[in-house]
Amino acid sequence: MFWFGLEFLDFELERKRLVERLISEGVLKTDKVIKAMLKVPREEFVLPEYKKYAYIDSPLPILKGQTISAPHMVALMCEAADLEVGHKVLEVGTGSGYHAAVIAEIVAPKEAKVKGHVYTIERIPELVDFARKNLEKTGYNDRVTVILGDGTLGYPEAAPYDRIIVTAAAPHEPKPLLQQLKIGGKLVIPIGSRYMQYLYVIEKVSGGKFERKSLTPCVFVPLIGEHGW
Ligand code: SAM
């Protein structure tokens, strides 16, 4: 619990209320994602001046003109990815590290015997430091590896992945990401123009065959790199 000027904030209660709202709106559906959203403290992943807004369902500014995604978008992408305990996941666009922590809470919960792992890649060095610190203070640094680099190239060192989640807007499907998916693996990615995109789930059904489903319109910051903008 924290005092902000005259305001008294109970982050746990605010988190619970937000999760209840996302359930009632039909965004949160499965126990595993609900449990993870209830557990990860978003207030530890935002800049100090935005802590009191941590449980408003909105993106918030982080460093270098980037944003931590809105909680409903994190929830929706985790539900769409159909994550399971034990999965190896690549996230492109680490930002604050919050979404990576939520994924880790699903694929590698502390109590599970079989542990998955999250590799998350970010192109801005200051955000790599920011995310590493946030993940360390919240106890996720053993389950999340943060890498500095161009995520449009994927991260071949740890491929193939069960799931790849891209949290920045792509002009098209980056080929290396399709290649680095396992057969049966899924890529969740916003694709469209710089200003508006659709969220897609792309499943690799065999070596060269992919099935695509478009879920919802969305707005993300651009994916900048060799296979991005
Ligand atoms: N998942 C983040 C979180 O939980 O805070 C929010 C991500 S923010 C909406 C998108 C991030 O993608 C930004 O931090 C941006 O720097 C990063 N990004 C953009 N292009 C990238 C690329 N080619 N490789 C890696 N990161 C990239």
Image (tube, rainbow, N blue to C red):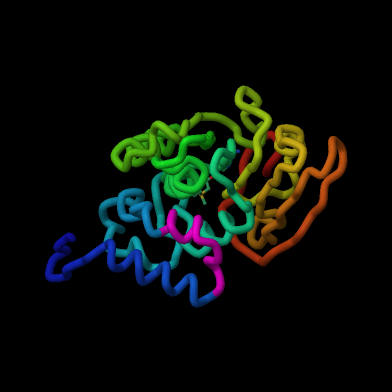
Q: Is residue 75 above or below residue 146?
A: below
Q: Residue at x 42, y 72 (%)?
A: 20
Q: Is residue 224 left or right of residue 178?
A: left
Which of the two residues, 39 or 196, is positioned nearer the viewer here?
39
Q: Which residues are magenta?
A: 26-37
| Residue 6 location, quadrant | bottom left
Q: Is residue 64 in sight in this rendering?
A: no
Q: Residue furthest right?
A: 208
Q: Quadrant of the N terminus?
A: bottom left
**Residue at the far bottom in the pictured view:** 24
Q: Quadrant of the C terminus?
A: top right
Q: Position of residue 134 (x, y in %)?
A: 34, 41
Magenta region includes residue 110: no
Q: Position of residue 115 (x, y in %)?
A: 50, 35
Image position, residue 50 (x, y; %): 30, 58
- Tell me if 169 is positioned left or right of 96 in this view: right
Residue displayed at 42% across by 45% down = 96
- Residue at x 70% of width, y 64% of height: 215
Q: Residue furthest front?
A: 113
Q: Residue at x 71, y 33 (%)?
A: 180
Residue 142 figure quarter: top left
